[in-house]
Image (tube, grey):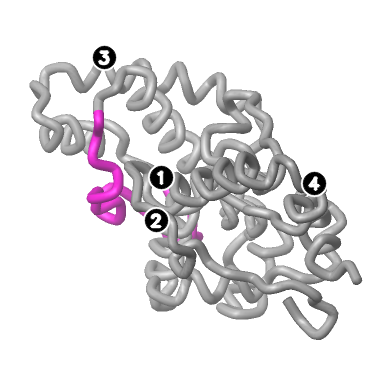
């Protein structure tokens, strides 16, 4: 947290919390619930702890967090890099790709990620248990010479449904549902819609198409964030203030 930090920061991997379905996020939420219960009689102790987690679906579901749990301002930590300034630095400075319009790439990346978010939403609503984590997304992302990505939705859904044990004949109906969900999600802030892993994987394919190693996408996008941006994000600002308070 820098020289002004006055607290200890631990990743959930290094906290002794029982594993749960839902991975590390579920473990972190469970930790926050445990602390809230066990420290309920000691406000001073409870107020000395914060548990920051990816919001995931909570912003879309209008769910609020109760301290010590704190949600990211966007859907995930990667949401903080979903900004034009980040894309301008990536393509204008890191890649020096003068032929790439950073704004157009950002907009097309958000569009592809929104469709993916809609697919995740339909999966959740219908309890399809589609194997998104195992999805080889790069096989369904096309990137043109200007760095503009497009998603081959039908092909992607066909593979997901087949791997989940469904009849492939239902792909068109699911695709229609995904498109309808995407239309609704486009009315929301991209910050709350775009899944962090989807953002990184789409951007990784754009980088690869422009002959920059996709494996370096995570380090690259993180290098674009500046301290000056923190004030734009209420939850991030609150966490930083908490960590640096005397």
From the image, state whether disc 1 or disc 3 is nearer to you: 3
Residue 18 at x, y percent in the picture: 37, 53
Assess whether mark 1 and mark 2 are in contact (beta carbons under 8 angstroms).
Answer: yes
From the image, state whether disc 4 or disc 3 is nearer to you: 4
From the image, tell me which residue sits under label 1.
150
Assess whether mark 3 and mark 1 are in contact (beta carbons under 8 angstroms).
Answer: no
What stretch of residues is rendered in magenta? 129-149
Residue 184 at x, y percent in the picture: 56, 19
Q: Going from the N terminus, do you reach mark 1 or mark 4 first?
A: 4
Look at the numbered disc 1 and give the secondary structure of its residue: strand
How far, Cα to Cα, is label 2 from label 1? Answer: 6 Å
**Mark 2 surroundings: few (<14), some (14-19) or many (≥20) residues within 10 A:** some
Is 104 rendered above or below residue 154? below
Q: Going from the N terminus, do you reach mark 1 or mark 3 first?
A: 1
From the image, state whether disc 2 or disc 4 is nearer to you: 4
Look at the numbered disc 2 and give the secondary structure of its residue: strand
Look at the numbered disc 4 and give the secondary structure of its residue: helix
């Amino acid at each position: 947290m820098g020289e002004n930090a006055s607290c200890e920061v631990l990743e959930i991997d290094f906290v002794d919390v029982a594993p749960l379905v839902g991975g590390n996020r579920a473990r972190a939420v469970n930790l926050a619930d445990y602390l809230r219960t066990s420290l309920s009689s000691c406000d001073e102790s409870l107020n000395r702890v914060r548990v920051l987690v990816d919001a995931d679906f909570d912003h879309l579901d209008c769910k609020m967090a109760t301290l010590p749990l704190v949600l990211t301002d966007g859907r995930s930590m990667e949401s903080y890099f979903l900004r034009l300034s980040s894309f301008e630095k990536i393509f204008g400075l890191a890649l020096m790709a003068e032929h790439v319009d950073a704004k157009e790439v950002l907009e097309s990346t958000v569009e592809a990620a929104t469709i993916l978010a809609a697919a995740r939403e339909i999966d959740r609503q219908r309890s399809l248990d589609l194997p998104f984590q195992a999805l080889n997304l790069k096989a369904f992302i096309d990137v043109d010479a200007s760095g503009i990505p497009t998603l081959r939705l039908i092909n992607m859904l066909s593979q997901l449904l087949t791997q989940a044990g469904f009849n492939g004949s239902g792909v068109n109906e699911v695709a229609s549902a995904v498109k309808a969900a995407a239309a609704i999600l486009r009315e929301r802030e991209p910050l709350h819609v775009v899944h962090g892993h989807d953002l990184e994987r789409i951007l990784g394919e754009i980088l690869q198409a422009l002959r920059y190693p996709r494996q370096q996408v995570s380090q690259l996008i993180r290098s674009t964030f500046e301290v000056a941006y923190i004030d734009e994000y209420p939850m991030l600002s609150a966490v930083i203030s908490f960590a640096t308070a005397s």
